[in-house]
Amino acid sequence: MLAPSVVLPIVGGVSAWILSWAMGGSVPLDIAGLVGVLGGTGWMATRFIFLTDKISDKVIQEIRQKAKDEENRRLSELQKMLRRDRDSRTQDYLLLLRTAKDDFEEVASRPGVEKRSGEIVLQVRQLFESAIQQLERSYKHWESSERLAGAERVNVIHQREQILQEVKAAVDHLEDVAKQYRDLMARERNVDLSQLRDELDTSLRIAKRTEERMRELESGPNYEFLRE
């Protein structure tokens, strides 16, 4: 804060005032003292503002990085878990989801773009999280199917297939949104993102209804084994 560029003008200004006082008063020295003190304090205030901004930016970046690290840890654990179901689709879907989301966020975080894209970024993350939860649910169904036999097993496997169809639809949509968004940002600066927002709203409503339907099914007596 008290860098030479701040201290020297203030010291010079005060020195000019002292010299003016010693000489019985000197208008040029008084003016020089005023300019020095005001200039130094003004520069100090400017440095404080920019330093505060840098500190805030640093804190925000640290929070974001911690959240990203936690998300990567969770997704890595899910990846390890999905290897056990011996179904290559689940691992492929997870990889495609992560890639589409990362591609989208890489474009959305560019200078001049981030503020305009805040709502869409939130929608993409919500859709991504919904798809991840469905992948986790698909694994739970696979685990249950391994303990069952007969009609119950067939029923659970059928429900798992429906879940994976929902995940595939989310993968396709996220990939499409990421491509559309990237193309829009490459073509023009002031783009209308309303169509993308509407598409994501529709997908989120569908995902919410699917989530509610699955929870209703799983809370029924025929799905007691899923809560074991």
Image (cartoon, rainbow, N blue to C red):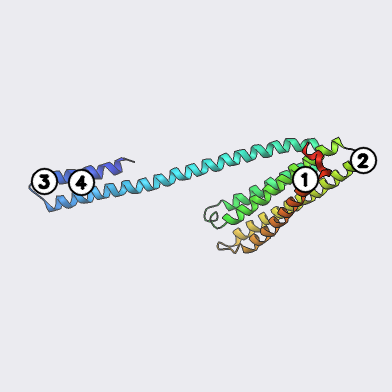
Mark drawn on residue 21 = 3
Q: How far separated are the C-alphas under marks 2 and 3? A: 103 Å
Q: Please tell me which of labels 3 and 4 falls first in the chain.
A: 4
Nearer the camera: disc 2 or disc 1: 1
Q: Residue at x 63, y 51 (%)?
A: 104
Q: Is residue 180 above or below residue 41?
A: below
Residue 148 horizontal side relative to residue 212, left or right: right
Q: Please tell me which of labels 2 and 1 falls first in the chain.
A: 2
Q: How far separated are the C-alphas under marks 2 and 4? A: 92 Å
x then y, percent, for residue 61: 52, 43
Identify the residue position indicated by label 4 in the image.
13
Q: Given the image, on which type of amino acid does mark 2 rest? A: Gly
Q: Please tell me which of labels 4 and 1 falls first in the chain.
A: 4
Identify the residue position indicated by label 2 in the image.
150
x then y, percent, for residue 39: 27, 50
Nearer the camera: disc 2 or disc 4: 2
The quadrant in which residue 7 appears is: top left
Q: Nearer the viewer, residue 66 or 176?
A: 66
Identify the residue position indicated by label 1 in the image.
219
Q: Given the image, on which type of amino acid does mark 1 rest? A: Ser
